[in-house]
């Protein structure tokens, strides 16, 4: 199980996540209570183990802007969080020649009485044959918020979607995961990986060491 601890804002939390066994750490450059600057991340990444993936989360659709941040911040992957834009993914794949991993976020809209299964399925189908997309992250979208909401999407409804595309895509589940529900999410959805931010925090931008340790231990085993 691939585990990403997202929305890191300081070196202490990021090093703790890596020491506990996280495969990847994320930094949010999109507008957020957890937003960081290129300079902040550039001061953190040199201290991280080489094997740990360093992921920038971007809402921008400007490939050159994203590429500059990746280079200056010392990142190894980009999470495209501003909606599915195949031209953006293609351009970044060309700029880096496949050297940088691309994680495409697909948003599952969470609204009472609304089913988002078909829109999600259609977006995943677009991504199946894209040469630059390494992973797809499915996250909850609540209102105008694109992440960090602490809200899960309907896993029972999503089960068939995950099963349909799991052979073709590395699917990561996000949105509302916590130490007390990550095992259920894994059993329900059988994802390739899991991603957490608010579920292991004391407050936005500050990790809870106990929750972080429990989440990684449970997800791993």
Image (cartoon, rainbow, N blue to C red):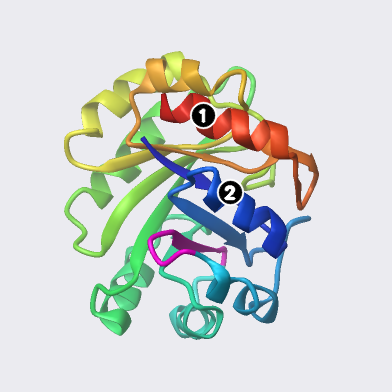
Answer with mark 1 or mark 2, whichever residue precedes in sequence. 2
Q: Residue at x 40, y 16 (%)?
A: 188
Q: In terms of depth relative to the viewer, which is nearer, 114 or 9?
A: 9
Alpha-carbon span between mark 1 and mark 2: 11 Å
Give SS at disc 2: helix
Classify residue 205 as left or right of residue 191: right
Q: Where is residue 179 in the image (x, y as percent from the top left)?
A: 61, 25
Q: Residues within 10 Å of mark 2 (few under 14, many from 20)?
A: many
Query: Which residue occupies the extreme front position in the image?
Result: 19
Q: How crowded is mark 1: few (under 14 residues within 10 Å), some or many (20 or more)?
A: some
x and y percent of residue 106 in the render?
Answer: 44, 45
Q: Name the image quarter holding the N terminus.
A: top left
Vertical side of 120 occupied by 22: above or below: below
Q: Is residue 78 left or right of residue 60?
A: left
Q: What element carries label 1?
A: helix
User: Does 41 sit left or right of 157 as displayed?
Assistant: right
- Quarter-wise, where is residue 153 in the image? top right
Is residue 51 magenta-colored?
Answer: yes
> Which numbered tag is attached to residue 217?
1
* The C terminus, quarter of image: top left
- Decide if residue 199 is in sight here: no
Say which residue label 2 marks.
Answer: 17
As rendered, which of 30 and 206 lies closer to the eye? 206
Write down the region rendered in magenta.
49-59
At 36% across and 19% down in the image, what residue appears? 159
For residue 93, side relative to residue 45 (left or right):
left
């Amino acid at each position: 199980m691939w585990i990403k601890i997202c929305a890191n804002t300081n070196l202490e939390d990021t090093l703790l996540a890596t020491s506990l066994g996280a495969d990847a750490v994320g930094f949010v450059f999109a507008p957020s209570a957890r937003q960081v600057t290129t300079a902040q991340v550039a001061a953190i990444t040199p201290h991280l183990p080489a094997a740990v993936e360093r992921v920038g989360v971007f809402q921008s659709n400007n490939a050159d802007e994203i590429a500059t941040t990746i280079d200056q911040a010392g990142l190894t992957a980009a999470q495209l969080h501003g909606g599915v834009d195949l031209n953006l993914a293609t351009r970044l794949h060309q700029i880096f020649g496949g050297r940088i991993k691309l994680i495409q976020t697909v948003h599952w809209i969470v609204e009472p009485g609304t089913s988002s299964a078909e829109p999600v399925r259609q977006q995943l189908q677009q991504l199946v044959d894209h040469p630059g997309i390494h992973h797809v992250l499915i996250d909850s979208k609540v209102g105008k918020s694109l992440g960090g909401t602490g809200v899960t999407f309907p896993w029972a409804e999503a089960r068939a979607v995950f099963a349909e595309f799991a052979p073709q895509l590395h699917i990561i589940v996000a949105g509302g995961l916590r130490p007390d529900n990550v095992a259920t999410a894994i059993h329900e959805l059988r994802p390739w990986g899991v991603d957490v931010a608010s579920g292991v925090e004391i407050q936005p931008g500050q990790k809870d060491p106990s929750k972080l340790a429990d989440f990684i231990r449970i997800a791993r085993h």
